[in-house]
């Protein structure tokens, strides 16, 4: 398994793949890999001749320094997990390689889709996501790029980014992978103790509760009851919104398709999750 650390190495590798006409899949990560990440790599491996996985803890998308400092970094373990895949290369850039001084960048106007929910609670977060993904897409130029649906709003921003900068990459949203109790897999889960992991399962239970109420209970009442469930479990709820999956605007009534997005803090660890609901109207 090849590992690259410089932009020059990646550029040379990509030129080789272009010359051979090989399709390239791309899985961007911040490391601390888990089964969710590996499911993205597995799907990319099935759909492309070669796959590049980037591991870079992006400082620009953290609006709290302590959160950046505490983010788990475990490169050796990550590389060990990736070795089971064939035709994989790994990009491990430093901050100076990721953001060279001479690299042009025109910020994308995030508009409303980047200002709601995560955008409102984490100022600067999506600006940082757009900056790093722009540079990665520009450098790697993959045919397909894979992102988890757990970060539903981020996926919407990535699709907007792809269109805005006219990269022409096929963006693939992949199913959320969950632990046995329903907790969405996340690198942040490493910071939860066993009791907190069970406590955090209240987020998934609330999502499942709302699913049962779609079309049967007024949407605001379903939200209110689900919020109470999360808070009664001892979590600090930041938001629980039921929104249109395309615009992310809040749903006033049930519609044919909606997504519930939740952010809550458990034991000082901020967790997000979502669930898409269909309804027969």
Image (tube, grey):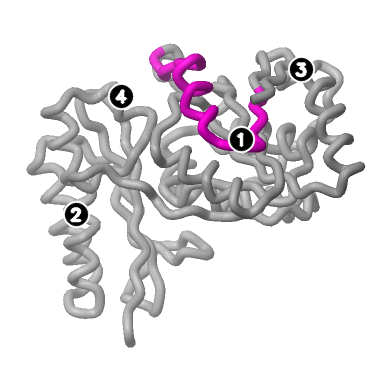
Question: Of discs 2 and 1, which sits in the foreground?
Answer: 2
Distance between mark 1 and mark 3 Cα atoms: 23 Å
Disc assigned to residue 6 = 3
Residue bearing mark 1: 127
Please state if 177 lies on the left or on the right of 210 as rendered: right
| Quarter of the image where the C terminus is located | bottom left
Q: Is residue 107 above or below residue 116?
A: above
- In x, y percent, where is residue 41? 54, 42
Residues marked 2 and 1 touching at CB (< 8 Å): no
Decide: few, some or many residues near mark 3? Use Cα within 10 Å; few <14, some 14-19, many ≥20.
Answer: some
Q: Secondary structure at mark 1?
A: helix
Residue bearing mark 4: 190
Marked residue nearer the N-terminal end (2 or 3): 3
Q: Is residue 124 above or below residue 21?
A: above
Marked residue nearer the N-terminal end (4 or 3): 3
Distance between mark 2 and mark 3 Cα atoms: 44 Å
Q: Residue at the spot x=54%, y=22% of the render?
A: 57
Distance between mark 4 and mark 2 Cα atoms: 22 Å
Distance between mark 4 and mark 3 Cα atoms: 29 Å
| Quarter of the image where the N terminus is located | top right
Disc assigned to residue 206 = 2
| Highlighted magenta segment, given as a residue range | 70-91
Question: Of discs 4 and 2, which sits in the foreground?
Answer: 4
- In x, y percent, where is residue 86? 61, 37
Please state if 227 lies on the left or on the right of 166 as rendered: left
Task: Name the quadrant containing residue 233.
Answer: top left
Distance between mark 2 and mark 1 Cα atoms: 30 Å
Question: Of discs 2 and 3, which sits in the foreground?
Answer: 3
As drawn, the residue found furthest toward the left would be 232
Marked residue nearer the N-terminal end (4 or 2): 4
């Amino acid at each position: 398994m090849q590992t690259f650390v410089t932009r020059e190495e990646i550029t040379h590798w990509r030129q080789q793949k272009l010359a051979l006409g090989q399709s390239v899949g791309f899985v961007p990560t911040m490391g601390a890999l888990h089964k969710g990440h590996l499911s993205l790599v597995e799907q990319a491996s099935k759909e492309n001749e070669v796959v590049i996985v980037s591991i870079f803890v992006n400082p620009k998308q953290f609006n709290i320094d302590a959160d950046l400092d505490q983010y788990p970094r475990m490169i050796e373990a990550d590389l060990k997990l990736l070795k089971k895949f064939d035709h994989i290369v790994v990009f491990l850039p430093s901050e100076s390689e990721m953001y060279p001084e001479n690299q042009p960048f025109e910020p994308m106007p995030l508009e409303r889709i980047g200002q709601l929910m995560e955008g409102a609670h984490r100022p600067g977060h999506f600006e940082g996501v757009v900056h790093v993904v722009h540079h990665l897409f520009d450098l790697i130029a993959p045919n397909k790029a894979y992102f988890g649906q757990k970060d539903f709003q981020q996926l919407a921003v990535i699709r907007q980014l792809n269109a805005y900068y006219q990269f022409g990459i096929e963006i693939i949203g992949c199913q959320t992978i969950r632990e046995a109790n329903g907790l969405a897999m996340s690198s942040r889960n490493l910071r939860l103790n066993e009791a907190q992991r069970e406590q955090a399962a209240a987020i998934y239970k609330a999502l499942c509760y709302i699913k049962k109420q779609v079309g049967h209970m007024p949407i605001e009442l379903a939200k209110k009851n689900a919020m109470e469930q999360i808070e009664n479990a001892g979590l600090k709820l930041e938001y629980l919104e039921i929104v249109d999956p395309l615009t992310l605007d809040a749903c006033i009534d049930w519609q044919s398709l909606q997504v519930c997005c939740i952010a809550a803090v458990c034991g000082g660890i901020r967790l997000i999750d979502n669930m898409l609901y269909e309804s027969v109207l």
